[in-house]
Amino acid sequence: MPFTPYHFGPCACVAIPLRRHIDLPVLLLTNVVVDVEPLTIEVLRLPLLAHGLLHSFAVSTFLGLGLAAVCWRGRRGLARAMRAVRYPYETSALKMLMSAVGGMWLHVLIDAPLYTDIRPFLPSMLNPLYGLYTYDTAALLCALCYIPALWLYLRCRTPKNPRS
């Protein structure tokens, strides 16, 4: 789906209930990174498939591993950002690693049924997921995910003044 805000709802619906095991900001960041590929191809008008290597499980796994390392180095900044939005946040290297790879895979799973140019199982050129649902259905479901995501966030956020 173009330019990942659609992906944030489903990501939050997965990450917030599993926050002891999944790092929400890492999951969200990885979803943004995957769509840098089609955005770059479109903006630069490159003669490539819009959904290329990053929209495959194999390549996205390696990128996820690298992104986990980058996020680990920036974990203090992520913690500050989560405190600012009152999201309970504790992380670990393993949690970031699982979240980065899982976020990449979730993005591929959401997009693969929608686009003929996605090859999720590279080196295979087949996309057996294509056509499982329509773009309109995916857009609606992803948008509707914001409702439970907001509810989940409001239920888990930390108190405004935790010391009082």
Image (cartoon, grey):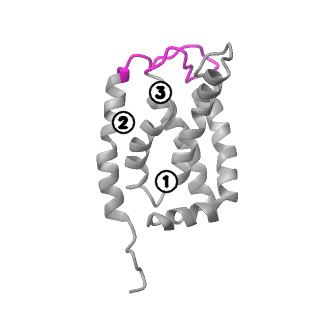
Residue 120 lies in magenta, yes or no?
yes
Residue 79: percent from left, percent from top: 56, 65
Q: Which residue is mark 1?
A: 24
62 or 1: nearer the viewer: 1
Please give the name of the residue rendered at 60% of the width and 16% of the height, measured from the top-left corner. Answer: 124
How far from the left and from the top, in percent, is residue 52?
A: 62, 22
Q: Are marks 2 and 1 in contact (CB under 8 Å)?
A: no
Q: CA distance from mark 2 to mark 3?
A: 11 Å
Residue 145 falls within the magenta-colored stretch:
no
In the rendered structure, which amino acid carries the disc numbered 3?
Asp
Which numbered disc covers residue 38? Answer: none
Q: Residues within 10 Å of mark 3 (few under 14, many from 20)?
A: many
Identified at 39% across, 75% down, the residue is 160
Q: Say whether residue 103 is left or right of residue 42.
A: left
Dot 1 falls on a residue whose secondary structure is: helix
**What is the span of residues highlighted in magenta in the rendered image?**
114-135
Q: Quadrant of the C terminus?
A: bottom left
Q: Give residue 71's position: percent from left, percent from top.
A: 65, 54
Real-space Cα separation, disc 1 to disc 3, in angstroms:
20 Å
- State the residue position of label 2: 142
CA distance for labels 2 and 1 = 17 Å
Q: Which residue is mark 3?
A: 111
User: Which is nearer the N-term, disc 2 or disc 1?
Assistant: 1
